[in-house]
Amino acid sequence: MTFDMIVKVTKLTSVFLIIALIIGLCAGCLGTNEDPEIDQLIQTLGDENDSVRMNATKALGEIGEPAVQPLIRVARNENEDTDFRRYAVYALGLTEDERAVDFLIRVLADENENPELRMSAASALIKAGDVAVEPLVQVILNKNRNPSAKAGAIEILGTIEDERAVEPLIQVLKDKNENEDIRRIAATALGKIGDERAIEPLVQVMNDKSDNEHVRESAARALGGIEGTAVEPLIQVMTDENENKNIRRFAAYSLADTGDERAVESLIQMLDDETIKIDAVDSLAKIGDARAADPLIEVLDDENPFIRRHAALALSDIGDEKAVEPLIQMLNDDIWEVRRDASQALANMGEPAVEPLIQVLGDENELTRKAASDSLGDIGDERAVEPLIQLLNDENDNVRKAAAQALGNIKDPRAIEPLIQALNDNNPEFRRIVSESLAKMGETALEPLILALENEDKNIKRGAALALGSTGNEKAVEPLILLLNDESENLRKDAAEGLGNIGDQRAVEPLIQLLSDDDKSVQIRAVYALGNIGGEKPVNCLIQILDNKTKDIEIRRAAAQALGFAGDERAMESLYQARSEEDMRLRRYANKALISIEMKNRPSISKA
């Protein structure tokens, strides 16, 4: 039932339509209100179904003033369930009623109140919006209010972003006798509101070296959120070598937030300042001005690998083609994280980086070949297909893996046959990646993969089976069913797993027959596959296995897990019984399966 329908119901006083949604009412009895309709909606706040509770919450908010006092009674009642009270609190915010706001502020200010309820009160006040601004302003200006209440009120005002809060927040910010955390939060709120009136007081606080360091930092950071004349003061602070390091850093971040071109040259100068070099790099990246490209290219040679990494990513954000060659040189870096970020930067550069990356696929350094393959796979340009196919025969395992993965990302049909042939590789991890890449090819790879099931090479057959199963395509069902009778137990396992992934009911009978296989690991794989397929027959079969205490314990454990995959309520009785058995792992799997089933079927299942 939608929110609009519930609102309509409340207006027509047809509460029985809502009651029809309720599975169980809340434990506490509230007594009879003057309006039974409101009483019934409030009771619905205790429903097990989150959707029903939220719809009732919205409906009560729409009712407005008549619902306020009943909701306050619920929210105030400490004997009620916490979630029930939280929904009542949130509904009060939707009413946009002054009495509701006053109550919510009292909850917010009560340090002895349940923390979850106080958080809900904060959310409700934000939802109340305009009507909450003046009362919240009174809270922050009240010298007798506790710091927790004032901090919460300031954060809410910053979120509401109402200009009426600006002058009071400035007053709090400038009061050096005020708690430093309160002043810091006030500065942040002013930055969120973004009113130009806050610029001058924020600049004054930022420049006052006698003031609290953390308040000054927050003032510097807040200035970045306000359009206006703060750029020059921020530049002055950032370039002052005698200034506190953190304040200089926050000034750099704020300059980036302004996006003002006047900041670029000053930030470039800071690339020579070790104190805030990395902050200057990040800020230049955010502004994205092409003037920063050459200076950032020079930073790629910095002795600090962390700065090299940030510079590489900054250059990709700017997108200047002249950065491609220097970034390719970074693929030879000794530090793995630097190579990774350089590779990502080149991928972000896109088309201009393709040809230079293809050239270095033949580099003598395997780390460079791998990183270039990664980048080309991320870019997805078809020009890289043939060179990457050549790398499937590279002497280095990691290079071959990267090439196979890249080809899977590009999805060019030219790679299908070479990838199938690569399945005869001796490295099982490489074969797995090749299978995954073939599966990504989709419909175009189906026929070649089905033909590969007849290949004499067992590794190729296994890889093709895994790829077919991963496609999820129903055309793979019959060929995989035939493999269930293969002489190789590994192929039978792979076929069973693939059929489970596809989830087609045609596989149910053949998989049930596989439960009599001579190899226990094959039986277990068939059990899992039946659980993934689900449905009446597979579930009944799995229940029989679980209930049969003469069965091998490993197969019974697999049945418990598979019943969790299936998510069928009919299995719950057997799983409850399995929780009492001696085998610890069986008990654990049964318990996890029950949780999975309950999660999948909420709210139709009552709690055990």
Image (cartoon, rainbow, N blue to C red):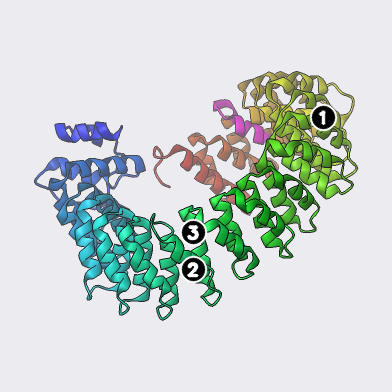
Q: Quarter-wise, where is residue 8 in the image? A: top left
> What residue is disc 1 on?
386
Residue 204: where, in percent of width, then height?
37, 71
Q: Nearer the viewer, residue 102 or 51?
A: 102
**Earlier sequence position, callout 1 versus callout 3:** 3
Residue at image location 27% in from the left, 54% down from the top: 162
Q: Quarter-wise, where is residue 232 in the image? A: bottom left
Residue 274: where, in percent of width, then height?
64, 69
Residue at image location 77% in from the left, 20% down from the top: 450
**Earlier sequence position, callout 3 versus callout 2:** 2
Q: Is residue 160 above or below residue 152?
A: above
Q: Quarter-wise, where is residue 186 in the image? A: bottom left
In the visual, does 12 lie left or right of 470?
left
Which amino acid lies under the numbered mark 3 shown in the image of this protein? Leu
Q: Is residue 83 above or below residue 150?
A: above
Q: Nearer the viewer, residue 289 or 158?
A: 289
In the visual, does 510 lie left or right of 152?
right
Residue 279 is marked as: none
Front of the two marks 3 and 2 = 2
In the visual, does 200 lie left or right of 324?
left
Residue 130: where, in percent of width, then height?
22, 51
